[in-house]
């Protein structure tokens, strides 16, 4: 149906822009599910690069450098915006023009997507769905802009006498004064009058912008995640220059219900401040080291992988772990020794702190002497034989045996400022946690579970104990506050991991209390004094109550 032109040119252009935005937002959302390379703007940009003569490419790289991709995508978007505005202006006359323009968009987008190497038919889905959404938005917005001038034009509006001419005054929008000459008079279209309604158009536009924005943001999030997952699984890990010694045969007592010596990546506790897990592309990742150094550097992921890698078993522990709590895990890490990198940059003698920052802005203050005293403090890239899981810091995190995670284990680390504790403060320090966080010796009863009911007779009591970088020398168990008895200790590869222990208990019927305490390799036994996690780690003996039947 031919609709008479009551919508001004600016409004048509706006409608076109917003409909184009909806098309792209929805396309990006779908591309987030299908694969970020199927987003038509990226595909068109890539196709453009492929078709570009070498001299132009060189010109772009020379003039825009690392930003050449951004400039390219920006250029594609600018051209799209212009076309979208024109489509909007044309669609004022006839919805068909709008669909034809969008269809053209779609064809170009689909062609670009499908000519990518390895493309399949589903890859056209983001463009197709985007075009449909854009067309729908275009139609809706146009209909909002040009309302039939008959009766139901909204609350508080005088009805239009049927078939009669409407004066601008009779269609005044509430709250606005008498309309000036810029408001086009209603015209007649096939006996049906239409009028331009700016307010209805603008609320529609706001809705369209919201749809486009949400689609783009969610789509980018999903797409970023997909891309990083793909990059992660593609990675080939170099072999360690300094492999960990094979685990002693008796490191894992293999008792049902006891934490395995190695915590599987998927079972590893996770603690961080990230609402959305940072998605860091290893190709873009850089670690900048600066501050009190002689030679500031920027290290790329490839630089890191080319260095000699050290493999090491280290148990991580969180300062917020309650006595007996779950926030501890043990893994085999692969990474570059932090001390080696720091030696190269030349640390000034007055420095005593490494202030590391993650991709999402978390900061962490690590005592420099701990990192450089010879222990396996690593820029870790792998965990238990695979690239770091994204939620555990991919592509690079710190691991420092002997320090709680909040002062050492920065995930997604991108920046290290060599500084002083009296000059800088990390994320948790002003929030009531100690500036330095050496791990306190702890032991935990994994079985029997608290509140369990077990049959009388020989019962296995077992758990783990840790005193990272000092080592656990003894674990004792007592029942009903009686004599302390030595538990049997599992083997360990070194002082940096937890140590499994077990104790055979001849259980008699009734209610019982089991307690555990560990002694470290310096002969220091865990204090009985109970303390909460804040400000520097919980203390006390893990106590489990159970019933024997
Ligand atoms: N970027 C970043 N890294 C971080 C944190 C954080 O909030 N953000 N939390 C730290 C804390 S408190 C701990 S205990 C460890 C936990 O590491 P995991 O989640 O791999 O077990 O990460 C540390 N690294
Ligand atoms: Mo933590």
Image (cartoon, rainbow, N blue to C red):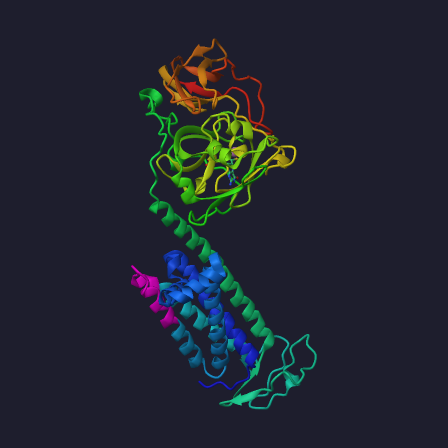
Q: Is residue 3 above or below residue 50?
A: below
Q: What stretch is highlighted in magenta?
A: 106-124
Q: How many labels does the image show?
A: 0
- Residue 109 is inside the magenta segment: yes
Displayed quadrant of residue 116: bottom left
Position of 457 compared to 92: left or right? Answer: left
Residue 357 seen:
no
Specify the principal SS of the magenta part.
helix
Viewer-side residue, 453 vs 500: 500
Spot occupied by residue 50 in the image (x, y as percentages of width and height): 36, 65
Q: Can residue 160 be seen in this view?
A: yes
User: Closest to the observer: 339 or 410?
Assistant: 339
Question: In the rendered image, which quarter contains the N terminus?
Answer: bottom left
At x 48% / y 33%, what residue is drawn? 338
Residue 295 placement (x, y as % from top left)? 54, 40
Q: Position of residue 75 (x, y in %)?
A: 47, 67
Depth order, front residue of 168/246: 246
State the image coordinates of residue 325 (x, y, percent, origin top left). Answer: 49, 28
| Quarter of the rendering containing residue 351 | top right
Of all residues, the one furthest to the right in this rendering is: 177
Residue 353 magenta-highlighted: no
Residue at 43% from the left image edge and 53% from the top image edge: 224
Residue 163, compared with residue 427, is above or below; it is: below
- Left or right of 243 on screen, residue 286: right
Residue 432 located left or right of residue 493: right
**100 over 249 or under it: above or below:** below
Quadrant of the snapshot with the C terminus: top left
Q: Which of 174 and 467 is in front in this view?
A: 467
């Amino acid at each position: 149906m031919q609709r008479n032109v009551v919508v001004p040119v600016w409004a048509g252009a706006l409608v076109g822009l917003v409909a184009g935005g909806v098309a792209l937002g929805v396309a990006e959302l779908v591309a987030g599910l299908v694969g970020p390379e199927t987003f038509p703007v990226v595909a068109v940009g890539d196709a453009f690069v492929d078709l570009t003569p070498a001299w132009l490419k060189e010109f772009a790289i020379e003039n825009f450098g690392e930003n050449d991709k951004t400039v390219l995508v920006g250029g594609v978007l600018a051209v799209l915006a212009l076309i979208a505005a024109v489509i909007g202006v044309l669609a004022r006359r006839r919805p068909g023009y709008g669909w034809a323009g969008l269809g053209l968009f779609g064809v170009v987008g689909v062609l670009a997507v499908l000519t990518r190497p390895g493309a399949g038919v589903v890859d056209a889905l983001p463009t197709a769905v985007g075009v449909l959404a854009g067309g729908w938005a275009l139609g809706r917005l146009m209909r909002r802009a040009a309302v039939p001038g008959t009766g139901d034009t909204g609350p508080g509006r005088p009805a239009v006498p049927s078939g009669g001419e409407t004066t601008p005054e009779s269609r005044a929008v509430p709250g606005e004064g008498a309309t000036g000459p810029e408001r086009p008079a209603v015209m007649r279209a096939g006996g049906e009058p239409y009028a331009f309604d700016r307010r209805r158009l603008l609320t529609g536009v706001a809705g369209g912008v919201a749809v486009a924005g949400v689609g783009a943001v969610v789509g980018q999030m999903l797409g970023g995640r997909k891309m990083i997952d793909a990059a992660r699984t593609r990675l080939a890990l170099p072999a360690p220059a300094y492999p960990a010694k094979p685990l002693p045969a008796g490191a894992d007592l293999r008792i049902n219900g006891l934490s395995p010596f190695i915590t599987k990546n998927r079972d590893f506790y996770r603690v961080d401040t990230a609402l959305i897990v940072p998605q860091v592309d290893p190709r873009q990742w850089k670690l900048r080291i600066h501050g009190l150094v002689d030679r500031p550097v920027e290290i790329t992921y490839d630089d890191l992988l080319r260095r000699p890698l050290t493999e090491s078993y280290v148990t991580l522990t969180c300062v917020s772990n309650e006595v007996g709590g779950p926030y501890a895990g043990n893994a085999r890490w692969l990474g570059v020794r932090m001390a080696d990198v720091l030696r190269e940059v030349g640390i000034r003698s007055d420095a005593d702190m490494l202030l590391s920052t993650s991709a999402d802005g978390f900061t962490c203050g690590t005592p420099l002497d701990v990192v450089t005293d010879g222990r396996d403090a690593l820029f870790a890239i792998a965990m238990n034989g695979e690239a770091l899981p994204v939620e555990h810091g991919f592509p690079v995190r710190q691991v420092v045996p002997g320090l709680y995670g909040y002062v050492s284990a920065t995930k997604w680390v991108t920046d290290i400022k060599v500084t002083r504790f009296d000059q800088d403060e990390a994320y948790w320090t002003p929030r009531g946690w100690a500036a330095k966080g050496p791990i306190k010796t702890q032991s935990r009863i994994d079985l029997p579970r608290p509140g369990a009911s077990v049959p009388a007779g020989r019962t296995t009591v077992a758990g783990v104990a840790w005193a990272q970088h000092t080592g656990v020398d003894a674990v004792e168990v007592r029942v009903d506050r009686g004599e302390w008895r030595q538990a049997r200790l599992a083997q360990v590869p070194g002082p940096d991991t937890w140590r499994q222990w077990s104790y055979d208990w001849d259980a008699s019927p009734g209610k019982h209390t089991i307690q555990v305490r560990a002694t470290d390799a310096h002969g220091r036994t865990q204090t009985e004094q109970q303390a909460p996690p804040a400000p520097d780690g919980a203390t006390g003996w893990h106590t489990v109550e159970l019933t024997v039947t």
